[in-house]
Structure formats: C-alpha cells, structure tokens
Image (spheres, rainbow, N blue to C red):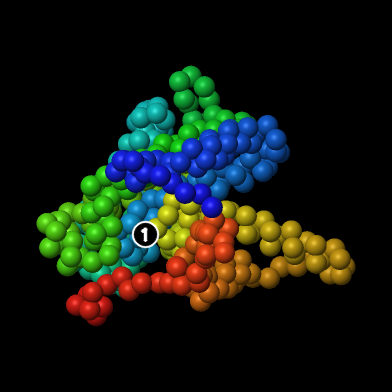
Amino acid sequence: MRILFKTSYDDDINLFKHNHHRFWYILLFVALLCLPFLISDYMVGEFTNVLIWALAGMGLMILVGQTGQASLGHAAFLAIGCYSNVILQSNFGLPFVISFPLAGLISGLAGVLLAIPTTRLHGIYLAIATLAASIIIEDIIVLAEPITGGVSGLYAPDINLFGYSINRYVDPSAFYWLTLGVVLIIVLFYKNLLRSPLGRAFAAVRDSEISAQAMGINVARTKAVSFGISTAITGLAGALMGHFAGIFTNETFNVIISITLLLMIVVGGVGSIHGAFFGAIIVAFLPQLLSFFRDWIGNTFELGSIVIPGLESAVFGCILIFFILFEPMGIYGMWLKLRTWFELFPFYRRDMFRRQKSYLKTERMR
C-alpha cells in the first residue's frame, strides 16, 4: 500500500501523483521512442495507426467524457481536417508545419459553428444533430469535386518537415515519431486543460447544467468551446490519417467511423486519457487478430480461406455489450479496480466503484 503525504493544494493538480508514477510514464515514453528499432516496419505502421486513433479518441473524449455531450458526427471533422491539410499543401503550396495546425483550426471553427445552433440540445437529440452534420459533410465533399476530388478522392503528398521528406510507406519510423510527437503534445494539453478553470467548467456542465449555471458558468459558451477544442484535436487526427492512408475519398470518413469512435472510448473508458488509448488498441488490432484467427482455423481444419462478412462489427458489438453490462467504466475501469485491489488489500470493498447518479431529478427527463 502506498500512502501519499500531501503538503500543498498543488499536489492535487500535479501532472504526476508521485515519483513512482512519474518513473513509469517516463519509462513508457522511452519504450515508445525505441519501438521502431525493436519491431518490423509492418508493426510500426500498426502502432502508428493506434496513435492516430488515440488522438481522435482524445478529441471525442473532451466532448463526451469531460463535457457530457453526445456526438455521432466526429467523422465529419476527421474529414475536414484531412481535406483541409491536403488542400492547403497541394493547392496553396503551404508547408506541412503550417497546413497541419491550420487544418486543426479549421476543424475547430467548424465545430464551433455546429455548436452554436445545438447548444440547447441534449442526449439523443444532440447525437442526431451531429449525425446529420456528418452526412451533410460527406455530401459536400462529393459536390465540391473541383476542390475535393469528389468520389475519386485526393492523394496526400509527402510530408516536408524542415527539408526532410516523410512518407509513411518509405520511412514508417519517421512518420511514427512525428505522430508520437503530436500525440504527446495533445496529451500534455489535455492534462493541463483538465486542471484549468475551463476543464473544471466542462466537468460541472457534464455533471449538472443547472448546478453549473448556479455557479455562474455560461453553459452555452462552455459547450461551444468544448466543441471547438474537441473537433480541432479530431481534425489533427484526420490530417495524420490522410497521410497514413495515402489516398482517401468521402467514403473513408463515413458514419461508421463516427460510431466506431464513440464505441471506442466507451470500451476504453469514458472520461480518461487512458481510455482513448485502450480503445484505440482494440480498434486497431481487432481486425488483425480476427484475420489471424480465420487463417489459423482455415489451415488447421483445411477449410481454405474463410470469409465471414460483418465479423469485425459483430465482435466489436459483442465486446461493447459486455462492457456495458459488466464493466461500464471500460478497460481503464477494470485496470483501476485491479490496481486498487492490490494497493488496498485486504481492505478493498466491492462497492468502492459503485456507479453514482449523475443528474438531478429536474434533469432526468431531458
């Protein structure tokens, strides 16, 4: 059992709880830096995919997990970030170091524009509104064919970073390190956001809008800011996703991607940065595991190649149902319970993580 002796209020908002906590995260960072030297180029690409999904998951987590606003339309902002980044490079000749943050900024502004008419919506109504926005953006991409390439799509150019050309297929390690650097910056931003007054306002709106208003928080403005930050981070993920894929069309960012993003953070653990990474690992590696499993069955029983349409969606849906029924806190919740059991044994109580009611009686009918 570890006992923390706090001597200042700053101890509650430090990036690391204690030196042991700091040591393990520094060790993890060093391991991630050395990863391309230890695994094949194929696995480097898979881990890069995990980081991109985790970045998109953190964007959605700010909106859903921290502010409590449902969204089924974040694939639209992945598309906005992806197309903006490539168009700024190809049509306007901007370097990646400028086009990349501008793509995030454009996605953030689009999120704010969506939030302005939808800040008074709650629950399923807000989810439907964001879903409609995703479908509209997909149609706009097709209609704006001279700019977006329509159904033919666009090719992402090589990343030119300070005179060094980065191509995911030619130099996967360089693209991995670039993605890792972006993810690290966003993680630090996320952690500091949660410690700021704005992050606490997000939590207040999530737990009870009426109570937040009573404390003087402008709920509409807080939701709009949350939408802006969330969609900006998602746009950065979309920009990296475009370079990772090489070529993309309107179908690359369909409604299924929005649903997958939402399910990803639910399985990983809503309301935590760790949940975005755990969910990203499931989304990125589940298709590979199923593919290996099909090949193993085919070779073992001499059945040849086995193709089961919709298998990935079915397995992911079963995983989601399992977590909703037995572990609503997701994979990160399971890890918290396991860690707490070891830290407090034999004083651990089963009801320590019992779910609490999140809304006042006046808000349950919304």
Can see residue 283?
Answer: no
- Name the image quarter holding the C terminus: bottom left
Spot occupied by residue 66 in the image (x, y as percentages of width and height): 33, 57
Instruction: Work out whether 7 lies above or below 79.
Output: above
Nearer to me, 350 or 83: 350
* Amino acid type shown at disc 1: Gly
Which residue is depicted at the point 69% across and 59% down? Answer: 289
Q: Mark 1 points at which residue?
A: 65
Spot occupied by residue 181 in the image (x, y as percentages of width and height): 48, 34
Query: Dividing the picture into quarters, in which one does residue 142 lie?
Result: bottom left
Quick one: SS at disc 1?
helix
Nearer to me, 315 or 68: 68
Which residue is depicted at the point 33% across and 51% down? Answer: 230
Nearer to me, 350 or 284: 350
Spot occupied by residue 304 in the image (x, y as percentages of width and height): 83, 66
Instruction: Work out whether 86 lies above or below 307.
Output: above
